[in-house]
Protein backbone atom coordinates (compact mmCIF):
# COMPACT_ATOMS: atom_id res chain seq x y z
CA UNK A 1 0.00 0.00 0.00
CA UNK A 2 1.31 3.44 -0.87
CA UNK A 3 1.52 6.38 1.56
CA UNK A 4 -1.69 8.14 0.57
CA UNK A 5 -3.41 10.45 3.05
CA UNK A 6 -6.90 9.11 3.66
CA UNK A 7 -8.54 12.54 3.71
CA UNK A 8 -7.07 13.42 0.30
CA UNK A 9 -8.14 10.07 -1.14
CA UNK A 10 -11.67 10.49 0.23
CA UNK A 11 -11.98 14.00 -1.25
CA UNK A 12 -10.80 12.72 -4.63
CA UNK A 13 -13.28 9.86 -4.54
CA UNK A 14 -16.13 12.24 -3.68
CA UNK A 15 -15.25 14.54 -6.59
CA UNK A 16 -15.04 11.69 -9.10
CA UNK A 17 -18.25 10.00 -7.94
CA UNK A 18 -20.25 13.23 -8.23
CA UNK A 19 -18.92 14.12 -11.70
CA UNK A 20 -20.13 12.83 -15.04
CA UNK A 21 -17.55 14.60 -17.22
CA UNK A 22 -13.97 13.87 -16.11
CA UNK A 23 -10.88 15.28 -17.78
CA UNK A 24 -7.51 13.52 -17.43
CA UNK A 25 -4.52 15.70 -18.33
CA UNK A 26 -0.98 14.55 -19.12
CA UNK A 27 2.00 16.96 -19.19
CA UNK A 28 4.23 17.76 -22.13
CA UNK A 29 6.84 15.08 -22.77
CA UNK A 30 5.02 12.66 -20.47
CA UNK A 31 6.76 9.67 -18.98
CA UNK A 32 5.72 6.16 -19.95
CA UNK A 33 4.53 5.70 -16.37
CA UNK A 34 2.28 8.78 -16.53
CA UNK A 35 0.69 7.79 -19.85
CA UNK A 36 0.11 4.22 -18.67
CA UNK A 37 -1.50 5.45 -15.44
CA UNK A 38 -3.67 8.02 -17.21
CA UNK A 39 -4.93 5.49 -19.74
CA UNK A 40 -5.74 2.95 -17.02
CA UNK A 41 -7.81 5.57 -15.19
CA UNK A 42 -9.49 6.67 -18.42
CA UNK A 43 -10.54 3.09 -19.27
CA UNK A 44 -11.82 2.45 -15.75
CA UNK A 45 -13.90 5.64 -15.61
CA UNK A 46 -15.31 5.05 -19.10
CA UNK A 47 -16.35 1.51 -18.19
CA UNK A 48 -18.13 2.95 -15.15
CA UNK A 49 -20.27 5.18 -17.38
CA UNK A 50 -18.34 8.42 -16.94
CA UNK A 51 -17.88 10.75 -19.92
CA UNK A 52 -14.12 10.86 -19.58
CA UNK A 53 -11.46 12.21 -21.88
CA UNK A 54 -7.67 12.20 -21.78
CA UNK A 55 -5.48 14.92 -23.32
CA UNK A 56 -1.80 15.70 -23.78
CA UNK A 57 -0.23 18.81 -25.35
CA UNK A 58 2.34 16.69 -27.23
CA UNK A 59 1.79 14.20 -29.99
CA UNK A 60 1.95 10.65 -28.64
CA UNK A 61 5.00 8.90 -30.11
CA UNK A 62 5.45 5.30 -31.17
CA UNK A 63 7.04 4.26 -27.86
CA UNK A 64 3.56 4.33 -26.27
CA UNK A 65 1.79 2.32 -28.98
CA UNK A 66 1.60 -0.89 -26.93
CA UNK A 67 -0.46 0.74 -24.19
CA UNK A 68 -4.16 -0.07 -24.38
CA UNK A 69 -6.34 2.91 -25.34
CA UNK A 70 -3.47 5.11 -26.54
CA UNK A 71 -5.53 6.17 -29.57
CA UNK A 72 -7.97 7.92 -27.21
CA UNK A 73 -5.45 10.59 -26.22
CA UNK A 74 -6.32 13.96 -27.76
CA UNK A 75 -4.38 17.22 -27.94
CA UNK A 76 -7.35 19.43 -26.99
CA UNK A 77 -9.91 19.39 -24.21
CA UNK A 78 -13.00 17.35 -25.04
CA UNK A 79 -11.92 17.04 -28.67
CA UNK A 80 -14.78 17.89 -31.04
CA UNK A 81 -17.31 18.13 -28.21
CA UNK A 82 -15.71 21.34 -26.93
CA UNK A 83 -17.52 24.62 -27.53
CA UNK A 84 -14.55 26.91 -28.29
CA UNK A 85 -12.92 26.80 -31.72
CA UNK A 86 -9.13 27.20 -31.49
CA UNK A 87 -7.14 28.19 -34.61
CA UNK A 88 -3.43 27.60 -34.20
CA UNK A 89 -0.36 28.28 -36.35
CA UNK A 90 3.40 28.67 -35.74
CA UNK A 91 4.27 32.03 -34.25
CA UNK A 92 7.53 33.98 -34.11
CA UNK A 93 7.84 36.80 -31.59
CA UNK A 94 6.88 40.10 -33.25
CA UNK A 95 5.75 38.51 -36.54
CA UNK A 96 2.06 39.57 -36.20
CA UNK A 97 1.15 43.21 -36.74
CA UNK A 98 -2.57 42.97 -36.01
CA UNK A 99 -5.44 40.48 -35.62
CA UNK A 100 -8.96 41.64 -36.44
CA UNK A 101 -12.24 40.32 -37.76
CA UNK A 102 -15.12 41.45 -39.94
CA UNK A 103 -18.46 40.03 -41.05
CA UNK A 104 -19.32 40.16 -44.73
CA UNK A 105 -22.23 38.43 -46.47
CA UNK A 106 -23.01 36.47 -43.32
CA UNK A 107 -19.44 35.20 -43.23
CA UNK A 108 -17.11 35.72 -40.30
CA UNK A 109 -13.59 36.63 -41.41
CA UNK A 110 -10.63 36.46 -39.07
CA UNK A 111 -7.83 38.68 -40.39
CA UNK A 112 -4.21 38.03 -39.39
CA UNK A 113 -1.90 40.77 -40.66
CA UNK A 114 1.81 39.88 -40.60
CA UNK A 115 4.43 42.49 -39.75
CA UNK A 116 6.63 43.82 -42.54
CA UNK A 117 9.63 41.58 -43.18
CA UNK A 118 8.07 38.45 -41.66
CA UNK A 119 6.57 35.50 -43.62
CA UNK A 120 2.81 35.35 -44.14
CA UNK A 121 0.61 32.71 -42.54
CA UNK A 122 -0.40 30.04 -45.07
CA UNK A 123 -3.40 27.68 -44.91
CA UNK A 124 -0.98 24.75 -44.53
CA UNK A 125 0.16 26.20 -41.20
CA UNK A 126 -3.34 26.32 -39.73
CA UNK A 127 -4.49 23.76 -37.19
CA UNK A 128 -8.02 23.59 -35.79
CA UNK A 129 -9.16 22.21 -32.45
CA UNK A 130 -11.76 22.77 -29.76
CA UNK A 131 -11.54 23.69 -26.12
CA UNK A 132 -13.99 24.13 -23.30
CA UNK A 133 -16.90 21.78 -22.78
CA UNK A 134 -18.69 20.45 -19.75
CA UNK A 135 -15.71 19.33 -17.65
CA UNK A 136 -16.64 18.87 -13.98
CA UNK A 137 -13.35 17.64 -12.50
CA UNK A 138 -9.76 17.66 -13.78
CA UNK A 139 -7.26 14.92 -12.90
CA UNK A 140 -3.66 15.96 -13.50
CA UNK A 141 -1.12 13.13 -13.71
CA UNK A 142 2.66 13.30 -13.48
CA UNK A 143 3.30 17.05 -13.40
CA UNK A 144 4.78 19.20 -10.65
CA UNK A 145 3.31 22.47 -12.03
CA UNK A 146 0.34 23.59 -14.14
CA UNK A 147 2.70 25.17 -16.66
CA UNK A 148 3.89 21.71 -17.68
CA UNK A 149 0.50 21.16 -19.32
CA UNK A 150 1.54 23.73 -21.89
CA UNK A 151 -1.18 24.49 -24.49
CA UNK A 152 -3.80 22.48 -22.62
CA UNK A 153 -3.49 24.85 -19.69
CA UNK A 154 -2.77 28.01 -21.67
CA UNK A 155 -5.86 27.62 -23.87
CA UNK A 156 -8.16 26.66 -21.01
CA UNK A 157 -7.08 28.65 -17.97
CA UNK A 158 -10.69 29.49 -17.18
CA UNK A 159 -11.56 25.80 -16.81
CA UNK A 160 -8.53 25.13 -14.60
CA UNK A 161 -9.50 28.11 -12.44
CA UNK A 162 -13.17 27.12 -12.12
CA UNK A 163 -13.09 23.33 -11.85
CA UNK A 164 -11.65 21.26 -8.99
CA UNK A 165 -8.32 19.66 -9.77
CA UNK A 166 -6.93 16.36 -8.47
CA UNK A 167 -3.13 16.32 -8.59
CA UNK A 168 -1.46 12.85 -8.68
CA UNK A 169 2.33 12.61 -8.71
CA UNK A 170 5.45 11.06 -7.13
CA UNK A 171 7.70 14.12 -7.41
CA UNK A 172 8.70 15.51 -4.01
CA UNK A 173 9.10 18.94 -5.67
CA UNK A 174 5.44 19.05 -6.73
CA UNK A 175 4.01 22.48 -5.83
CA UNK A 176 0.63 20.97 -4.86
CA UNK A 177 -1.44 23.11 -7.22
CA UNK A 178 -4.57 20.95 -6.96
CA UNK A 179 -7.60 21.20 -4.74
CA UNK A 180 -6.74 17.60 -3.86
CA UNK A 181 -3.10 16.54 -3.88
CA UNK A 182 -2.17 12.87 -3.86
CA UNK A 183 1.63 12.99 -3.78
CA UNK A 184 3.78 10.06 -2.65
CA UNK A 185 7.53 10.47 -3.26
CA UNK A 186 8.18 7.07 -1.67
CA UNK A 187 6.37 5.27 -4.49
CA UNK A 188 8.45 3.98 -7.36
CA UNK A 189 5.83 5.00 -9.92
CA UNK A 190 2.54 6.80 -10.47
CA UNK A 191 1.05 3.48 -11.55
CA UNK A 192 1.80 2.10 -8.11
CA UNK A 193 -0.29 4.91 -6.58
CA UNK A 194 -3.02 4.28 -9.15
CA UNK A 195 -3.36 0.62 -8.17
CA UNK A 196 -4.15 1.74 -4.62
CA UNK A 197 -6.55 4.43 -5.86
CA UNK A 198 -8.47 1.88 -7.91
CA UNK A 199 -9.28 0.07 -4.70
CA UNK A 200 -10.06 3.27 -2.77
CA UNK A 201 -12.25 4.64 -5.58
CA UNK A 202 -14.09 1.37 -6.12
CA UNK A 203 -12.93 1.12 -9.75
CA UNK A 204 -12.81 -2.20 -11.58
CA UNK A 205 -9.35 -3.54 -12.35
CA UNK A 206 -9.70 -5.62 -15.50
CA UNK A 207 -7.10 -7.10 -17.83
CA UNK A 208 -6.66 -3.92 -19.90
CA UNK A 209 -6.25 -1.63 -16.88
CA UNK A 210 -3.95 -4.12 -15.18
CA UNK A 211 -1.79 -4.41 -18.29
CA UNK A 212 -1.28 -0.65 -18.45
CA UNK A 213 -0.63 -0.33 -14.73
CA UNK A 214 1.86 -3.22 -14.67
CA UNK A 215 3.73 -1.60 -17.56
CA UNK A 216 3.74 1.71 -15.67
CA UNK A 217 5.12 0.09 -12.53
CA UNK A 218 7.81 -1.74 -14.48
CA UNK A 219 8.82 1.44 -16.31
CA UNK A 220 8.66 3.77 -13.29
CA UNK A 221 10.72 1.40 -11.14
CA UNK A 222 13.28 0.75 -13.91
CA UNK A 223 12.19 -2.89 -14.05
CA UNK A 224 12.08 -3.09 -10.24
CA UNK A 225 15.68 -1.87 -9.74
CA UNK A 226 15.22 1.75 -8.66
CA UNK A 227 15.98 2.97 -5.14
CA UNK A 228 12.26 3.53 -4.53
CA UNK A 229 11.41 -0.11 -5.29
CA UNK A 230 10.10 -1.75 -2.13
CA UNK A 231 7.78 -4.50 -0.98
CA UNK A 232 4.76 -2.40 -1.92
CA UNK A 233 6.03 -2.17 -5.50
CA UNK A 234 6.00 -5.94 -5.85
CA UNK A 235 2.65 -6.22 -4.07
CA UNK A 236 0.98 -3.81 -6.50
CA UNK A 237 2.62 -5.55 -9.45
CA UNK A 238 1.29 -8.85 -8.12
CA UNK A 239 -2.23 -7.38 -7.91
CA UNK A 240 -1.99 -6.48 -11.60
CA UNK A 241 -0.78 -9.97 -12.48
CA UNK A 242 -3.64 -11.54 -10.55
CA UNK A 243 -6.01 -9.48 -12.72
CA UNK A 244 -4.56 -10.95 -15.91
CA UNK A 245 -2.09 -8.21 -16.77
CA UNK A 246 -0.12 -8.92 -19.91
CA UNK A 247 3.56 -8.06 -20.07
CA UNK A 248 4.26 -5.60 -22.87
CA UNK A 249 7.46 -4.11 -24.22
CA UNK A 250 8.41 -0.91 -22.43
CA UNK A 251 11.06 1.58 -23.53
CA UNK A 252 14.33 1.49 -21.62
CA UNK A 253 15.19 4.39 -19.35
CA UNK A 254 18.47 4.94 -21.20
CA UNK A 255 19.45 3.58 -24.58
CA UNK A 256 23.06 3.50 -23.43
CA UNK A 257 22.22 1.41 -20.38
CA UNK A 258 20.05 -0.78 -22.55
CA UNK A 259 22.95 -1.48 -24.87
CA UNK A 260 25.13 -2.41 -21.94
CA UNK A 261 22.53 -4.63 -20.30
CA UNK A 262 21.51 -6.35 -23.50
CA UNK A 263 25.04 -6.85 -24.86
CA UNK A 264 25.28 -10.54 -25.84
CA UNK A 265 27.82 -12.72 -24.09
CA UNK A 266 30.20 -14.51 -26.50
CA UNK A 267 29.31 -18.18 -26.79
CA UNK A 268 31.65 -21.09 -26.16
CA UNK A 269 31.77 -21.77 -29.91
CA UNK A 270 32.95 -18.19 -30.50
CA UNK A 271 35.90 -18.72 -28.19
CA UNK A 272 36.79 -22.02 -29.86
CA UNK A 273 36.19 -21.21 -33.53
CA UNK A 274 37.00 -17.51 -33.61
CA UNK A 275 39.35 -16.67 -30.76
CA UNK A 276 40.48 -13.52 -32.54
CA UNK A 277 36.87 -12.22 -32.49
CA UNK A 278 36.40 -12.88 -28.80
CA UNK A 279 35.88 -9.89 -26.55
CA UNK A 280 37.56 -11.74 -23.65
CA UNK A 281 40.94 -10.38 -22.62
CA UNK A 282 43.24 -11.60 -19.89
CA UNK A 283 44.14 -9.20 -17.16
CA UNK A 284 47.86 -8.57 -16.48
CA UNK A 285 47.62 -10.74 -13.34
CA UNK A 286 46.02 -13.59 -15.32
CA UNK A 287 48.71 -13.28 -18.02
CA UNK A 288 51.50 -13.40 -15.44
CA UNK A 289 49.86 -16.32 -13.70
CA UNK A 290 49.51 -18.22 -16.99
CA UNK A 291 53.14 -17.55 -17.94
CA UNK A 292 54.51 -18.79 -14.62
CA UNK A 293 52.32 -21.84 -14.34
CA UNK A 294 53.89 -25.20 -15.26
CA UNK A 295 52.14 -28.34 -14.05
CA UNK A 296 55.44 -30.28 -14.19
CA UNK A 297 56.92 -28.04 -11.54
CA UNK A 298 54.10 -28.70 -9.10
CA UNK A 299 55.43 -30.78 -6.17
CA UNK A 300 54.02 -34.30 -5.95
CA UNK A 301 53.76 -36.65 -2.97
CA UNK A 302 56.57 -39.21 -2.54
CA UNK A 303 54.36 -42.07 -3.75
CA UNK A 304 53.74 -40.27 -7.02
CA UNK A 305 57.42 -39.41 -7.46
CA UNK A 306 58.32 -43.09 -6.96
CA UNK A 307 55.66 -44.20 -9.45
CA UNK A 308 53.74 -45.94 -6.70
CA UNK A 309 49.91 -45.95 -6.55
CA UNK A 310 48.42 -43.65 -3.98
CA UNK A 311 47.73 -45.38 -0.69
CA UNK A 312 50.39 -48.07 -1.23
CA UNK A 313 53.61 -48.04 0.75
CA UNK A 314 56.78 -47.86 -1.27
CA UNK A 315 58.75 -51.03 -1.80
CA UNK A 316 61.36 -51.93 0.83
CA UNK A 317 64.03 -52.39 -1.75
CA UNK A 318 64.75 -49.03 -3.21
CA UNK A 319 67.28 -48.54 -5.99
CA UNK A 320 70.48 -47.00 -4.78
CA UNK A 321 70.71 -43.35 -5.49
CA UNK A 322 73.59 -41.89 -7.36
CA UNK A 323 76.60 -40.96 -5.24
CA UNK A 324 76.19 -37.48 -6.58
CA UNK A 325 75.10 -35.23 -3.78
CA UNK A 326 71.58 -33.94 -4.24
CA UNK A 327 70.25 -30.69 -2.91
CA UNK A 328 67.75 -31.18 -0.12
CA UNK A 329 64.16 -30.44 -0.91
CA UNK A 330 62.82 -27.15 0.30
CA UNK A 331 60.96 -27.51 3.55
CA UNK A 332 57.93 -25.86 1.99
CA UNK A 333 57.65 -28.83 -0.42
CA UNK A 334 57.81 -31.54 2.29
CA UNK A 335 54.69 -33.68 2.40
CA UNK A 336 52.78 -33.42 5.69
CA UNK A 337 52.80 -36.71 7.65
CA UNK A 338 49.00 -36.90 7.62
CA UNK A 339 48.69 -36.17 3.90
CA UNK A 340 47.00 -39.54 3.13
CA UNK A 341 44.80 -39.60 6.20
CA UNK A 342 41.11 -38.66 5.85
CA UNK A 343 40.35 -35.11 6.99
CA UNK A 344 37.46 -34.29 9.35
CA UNK A 345 36.25 -30.71 9.45
CA UNK A 346 35.64 -29.45 12.97
CA UNK A 347 33.81 -26.14 12.94
CA UNK A 348 32.09 -24.02 15.55
CA UNK A 349 28.68 -25.01 14.20
CA UNK A 350 29.26 -28.76 14.59
CA UNK A 351 26.67 -30.24 16.97
Image: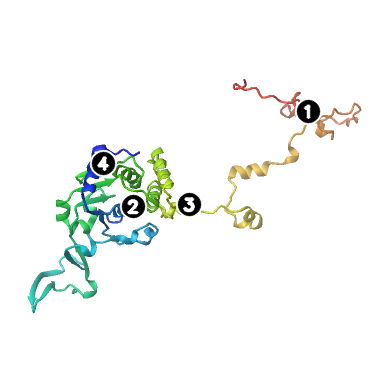
Residue 334 in the figure: left or right of residue 122: right
Residue 322 in the figure: left or right of residue 147: right
Of tags 2 and 3, the one toward the viewer is 2
Pointer 3 local density, CA inside 10 Å: few below 14, some 14–19, many at least 20: few
Mark 4 and mark 3 residues within 8 Å of each other at the beta carbon: no
Q: Which residue position holds label 1?
A: 328
Compared with 176, 345 (above or below) is above
Q: Which residue position holds label 2?
A: 40
Q: Is residue 100 visible?
A: yes
Q: Which residue position holds label 4?
A: 9
Residue at 19% across, 73% down:
121
Q: Which residue position holds label 3?
A: 260
Residue at 22% across, 42% down:
11
Of tags 4 and 3, the one toward the viewer is 4
Q: CA distance from mark 1 to mark 2?
A: 83 Å
Quarter of the figure with residue 310: top right
Quadrant (top left/top right/bottom left/bottom right) for the C terminus: top right
First-in-chain label (4 vs 2): 4
Q: CA distance from mark 4 to mark 2?
A: 18 Å
- The answer to which of 209 and 176 lies nearer the viewer is 209
First-in-chain label (4 vs 3): 4
Amino acid sequence: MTNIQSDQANQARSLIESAQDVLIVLPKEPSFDAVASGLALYLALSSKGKRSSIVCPDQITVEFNRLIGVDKISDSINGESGKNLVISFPYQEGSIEKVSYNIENETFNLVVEPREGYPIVTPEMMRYSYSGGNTEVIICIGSSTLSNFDSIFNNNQGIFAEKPTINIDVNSQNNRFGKVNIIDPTSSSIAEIMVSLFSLFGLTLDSDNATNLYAGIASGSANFTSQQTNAGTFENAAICMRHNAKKITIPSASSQNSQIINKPTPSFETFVKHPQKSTYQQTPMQTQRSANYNPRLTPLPPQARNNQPFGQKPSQTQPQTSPVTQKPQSQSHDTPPDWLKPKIYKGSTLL
